[in-house]
Amino acid sequence: MLGVDPSESAQAALGHEPLEERAWTVLVLGLEATGRMLEALQAYDRCRRLLHQVLGCAPGAALRHAYRRALQATTTTWPKPC
């Protein structure tokens, strides 16, 4: 479908299955792609905490990669101090 925001679709999926790591990955990447870096980092942190609390595990490689991508994007988009 054209015009569908991947982050909105991911949030809808997470409403049904909050432990679906692929949906978290799509959410983080979608937020990062639309310039919403802080939200992307916050989403990753919510997922990381949830996985730890419920399953006792850490995010997988794909989600960690999405996190690193969003984190790296923050360093290139935020203004440099004077």
Image (cartoon, rainbow, N blue to C red):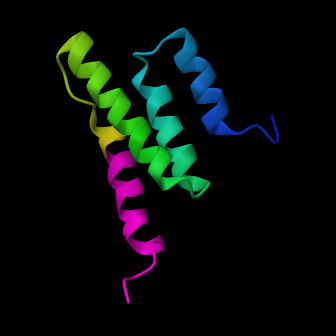
- Up/down of 62 relative to 73, above or below: above
Q: Furthest residue to the front?
A: 82
The residue shown at (39%, 82%) is 80
Q: Position of residue 55 (x, y in %)?
A: 23, 12
The residue shown at (37%, 38%) is 44
Work out which quarter of the rendered image holds the N terminus and state it.
top right
Work out which quarter of the rendered image holds the C terminus and state it.
bottom left
Q: Is residue 44 left or right of residue 57?
A: right
Residue range of the region highlighted in magenta in the rendering? 65-82
- Give the main secondary structure of the magenta stretch: helix
Q: Quadrant of residue 49?
A: top left
Q: Is residue 64 left or right of residue 7?
A: left
- Up/down of 32 relative to 12, above or below: below
Q: Quadrant of residue 22?
A: top left
Q: Position of residue 27 (x, y in %)?
A: 52, 36
- Counting every numbered tag in the picture gives 0
Instruction: Assess whether residue 2 is covered by the magenta stretch.
Output: no
Q: Quadrant of residue 42?
A: top left
Instruction: Assess whether residue 75 is covered by the magenta stretch.
Output: yes
Q: Position of residue 16 (x, y in %)?
A: 55, 9
Q: Nearer the viewer, residue 42 or 51?
A: 42
The residue shown at (64%, 37%) is 6
Q: Furthest residue to the left?
A: 56
The residue shown at (36%, 63%) is 72
- Up/down of 79 relative to 72, above or below: below
